Amino acid sequence: MKNILIGIVLLFVTLSFTTDNGKLSGVVTYKDAYESSNQADAGCEIYAINKADARSSQYGDLAKVVGRFLMNKSNYSVSVINSIDPERVKKAQDYFDSVSDFTFKYIRGFKKSPAAVRAATDGKGNYTMNLRPGTYYLLFVSGNVKSDNIAESKGNIDLKVAEIKSAGVTQLDENFRIHENFMLMLLTGRWMQGC
């Protein structure tokens, strides 16, 4: 009788500490500047890490690193278009290359982190992940859109934040663009280098 009572108490304690996972799902697409509709980004990789887990690891600066990279990518594109000075363009290229190299190494390490949960999109661009409740960083690496820099040579990147609720479904879509600076190219008549 005593063993049965201890077993019931242990079962109750174990069940009281379990939480229902939430589900994150969405569609990842890409759009070419020459196309009128979005296409499924099949093979896009999605990496999720709980913000608290990221803060307690060496990848606590993930949002800053990706944000800095994307800002520098945009600034580099604008500086190349606005400058005819080859020395200034070379300096901007060198700086962007160093930021891109750092970002590439940081993300490569992050992808191998045991705290990161990985998923990939199917042929229709759909993905689904089962995650514990909490706030997550989501790193998207496109399967179809690539840029001419080391950080995005295997796929353009983007970072989003999602709140996962217990036993609920969170929908988060992503859309990549080919020729992100298409309007700038039309205005200047030049193709971007490095993007």
Image (cartoon, rainbow, N blue to C red):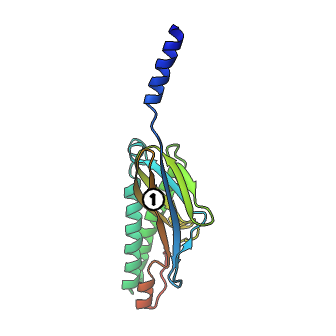
The x and y percentages for residue 60 are 39, 48
Which residue is drawn at the image coordinates 63% and 65% (left, top)? 123
Q: Seen in the image, is 187 located left or right of residue 5?
A: left
Q: Position of residue 160 (x, y in %)?
A: 41, 59
Residue at position x 53%, y 8% from top?
1
Note whether 181 is above or below 25 in the view shown: below
As drawn, which residue projects farthest toward the right?
123
Residue placed most toward the observer, 82 or 170: 170
Q: Is residue 88 visible?
A: no
Q: Residue furthest top?
A: 1
Residue 155 position by quadrant: bottom right
Depth check, front residue: 112 or 79? 112
Question: Residue beneath label 1, please?
Answer: 171
Q: Is residue 131 visible?
A: yes
Dot 1 alpha-carbon crowd within 10 angstroms: few under 14, some 14 to 19, many 20 or more: some
What secondary structure is found at the residue carrying circle 1? Answer: strand
Q: Using the image, determine if residue 58 lies above or below residue 69.
A: above
Residue 182 vertical position relative to residue 70 in the rendered view, above or below: below
Q: Whole-percent x and y of residue 24?
A: 48, 53
For badge 1, the amino acid type reads Gln
Residue under the point 38% across and 43% down: 52
- Count numbered badges in the picture: 1
> Relative to residue 171, is residue 187 depicted above or below?
below
The residue most toward the front is 1
Instruction: From the top left corner, tell me how far across and down residue 13 is, in percent.
Output: 44, 24
